[in-house]
Image: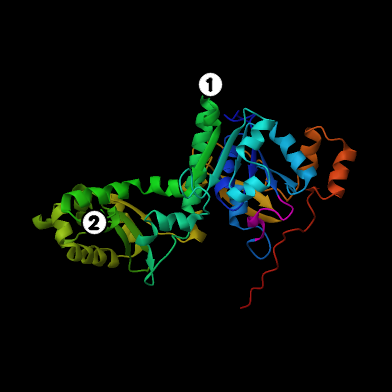
């Protein structure tokens, strides 16, 4: 087994749903020991699908240890602070109010461990909204993303929680930067990542673009995204009802596409330049739809490949992992969890996938971690009896049986 860059580092996660668990998932993939500290009720994602764990929990919590503590009790709080004294990093995405109430602010934990890297993923970083709450769709709404995604006339969230995941990735970048710093200052070890600020950074291209158009044209106008500004760049349906996405970004791409599919428009000098194709967008779009729609999928992709056109099939989720590309070394991790089998995508760049630990049961490693912290068996028993900590219970968070009525 190869030595990973964060081997020997201990990371404490106090998180739920996506942002913090996604950050610690990446750190775990880089070799860190991640101890997932959960309340007796567990991470919310443990009970999202028919009473059992959802895809979020399975995908982003394998390889971690679960320590279940009731932080509202003095005994539980004492255990957590003793654990914090042994850690390199703590990452959480609890609300500001809960953070103060539980006594786990940066200043609280630095009393236990002055060198700990403390990362709080929260709704808003410093500013007048510092105490406000935000979720992934709130970040989308407040940074311009949602205004572009109109469903049935109503601004709507994108669906996947990409802003949560970006915030988790930004947290990892900041943590790694601090670990690499040979002489970090105290402020470097106190990290705040706001979902709002994450959204701003993701939208920076569009925010700069609208400022550019306002100054050039005297009115706010959004720069069109590539798919909408370049005719022929998008998804088109074949005659056998499959969708292929074409990468037609340049004039050279257009020439390859139109000639490869034998389109009569290939010889039209008026369409040779993108500027002119934009002016005749409807004509170009109709021509590409007709050309692709006259071919079945296999014939279409043969012609596209021979012409050197970039493309891919638009796949439903249930077919994504059928692709041979997805099964190359280091791409997927095989997990067996509660009698079910999963192929879970790895953090990109892995050369191979170690079997590793499956997602932990709630409190599965509670006693193991307590003993490592120096608690004797009778002390562990006392903590368990007082319900300050919890161990895994058989059949807890089990999926309800699914009926397949036909």
Give the alpha-carbon distance from disc 2 to disc 1, as whole Å: 46 Å
Q: Nearer the viewer, residue 324 or 278?
A: 278
Q: Nearer the viewer, residue 90 or 269?
A: 90
Q: What kind of element bears circle 1?
A: loop
Q: Is residue 308 above or below residue 278?
A: above
Tell me if I can see residue 87 in this picture.
no
Q: Nearer the viewer, residue 189 or 321?
A: 189
Within 10 Å of the Cα at label 2, are there few (<14), some (14-19), or many (20+) other Cα atoms? some
Q: Which mark is residue 183?
A: 1
**Residue situated furthest left in the rendering:** 269
Which residue occupies 33% across, 69% down? 239
Within 10 Å of the Cα at label 1, are there few (<14), some (14-19), or many (20+) other Cα atoms? few
Say if the magenta span includes residue 43.
yes
The residue labelled by disc 2 is 221
The magenta segment is 39-47
* Earlier sequence position, callout 2 versus callout 1: 1
How many labels, in total? 2
If the image is split into quadrants, where does the C terminus sit? bottom right
Say if the magenta span includes residue 71.
no
Which residue occupies 87% across, 49% down? 385
Which residue occupies 72% across, 37% down? 81
Which residue occupies 81% across, 35% down? 371
Q: In x, y percent, where is residue 51?
A: 68, 64
Q: Please indicate whether residue 373 sits to the left or right of residue 131 in the image.
A: right
Q: What kind of element bears circle 2?
A: loop
Q: Is residue 68 above or below residue 8?
A: below
Is mark 2 in CB contact (under 8 Å) with mark 1? Answer: no
**Residue situated furthest top in the rendering:** 182
Q: In x, y percent, where is residue 267?
A: 11, 56
**Residue situated furthest right in the rendering:** 378
């Amino acid at each position: 087994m190869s030595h990973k860059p964060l081997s020997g580092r201990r990371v404490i996660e106090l998180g739920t749903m996506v942002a913090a668990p996604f950050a610690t998932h990446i750190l775990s993939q880089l070799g860190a020991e991640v101890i997932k500290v959960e309340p007796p009720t567990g991470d919310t994602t443990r009970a999202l699908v028919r009473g059992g764990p959802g895809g979020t929990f399975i995908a982003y919590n394998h390889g971690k240890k679960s320590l279940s503590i009731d932080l509202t009790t003095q005994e539980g709080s004492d255990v957590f602070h003793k654990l914090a004294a042994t850690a390199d990093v703590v990452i959480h995405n609890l609300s500001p109010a809960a953070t103060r109430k539980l006594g786990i602010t940066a200043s609280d934990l630095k009393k236990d461990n002055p060198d700990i890297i403390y990362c709080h993923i929260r709704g808003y970083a410093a500013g007048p909204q510092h105490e406000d709450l935000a979720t992934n769709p709130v970040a989308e709404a407040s940074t311009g993303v949602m205004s572009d995604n109109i469903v049935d006339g109503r601004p709507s969230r994108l669906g996947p929680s990409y802003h949560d995941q970006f915030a988790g990735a930004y947290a990892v970048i900041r943590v790694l930067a601090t670990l690499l710093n040979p002489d970090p200052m105290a402020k470097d070890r106190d990290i705040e990542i706001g979902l709002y600020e994450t959204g701003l950074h993701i939208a920076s291209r569009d925010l700069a673009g609208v400022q550019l158009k306002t100054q050039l044209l005297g009115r706010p106008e959004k720069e069109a995204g590539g798919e909408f500004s370049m005719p022929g760049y998008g998804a088109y349906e074949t005659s056998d009802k499959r969708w292929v996405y074409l990468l037609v970004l340049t004039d050279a791409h257009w020439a390859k596409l139109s000639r490869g599919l034998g389109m009569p428009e290939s010889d039209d000098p008026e369409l040779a330049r993108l500027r002119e194709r934009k002016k005749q967008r409807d004509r170009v779009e109709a021509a590409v739809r007709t050309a692709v729609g006259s071919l079945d999928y296999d014939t279409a992709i043969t012609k596209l490949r021979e012409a050197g056109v970039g493309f891919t099939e638009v796949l439903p989720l249930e077919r994504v992992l059928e692709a041979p590309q997805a099964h190359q070394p280091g791409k997927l991790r095989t997990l067996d969890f509660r009698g079910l089998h999963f192929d879970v995508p790895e953090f990109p760049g892995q050369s191979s996938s170690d079997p590793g630990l499956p997602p932990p049961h709630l409190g599965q490693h509670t006693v193991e971690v307590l003993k490592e912290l120096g608690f004797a068996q009778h002390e562990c028993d006392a903590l368990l009896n007082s319900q300050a900590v919890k161990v895994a219970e058989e059949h807890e968070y089990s999926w309800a049986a699914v009926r397949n009525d036909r």
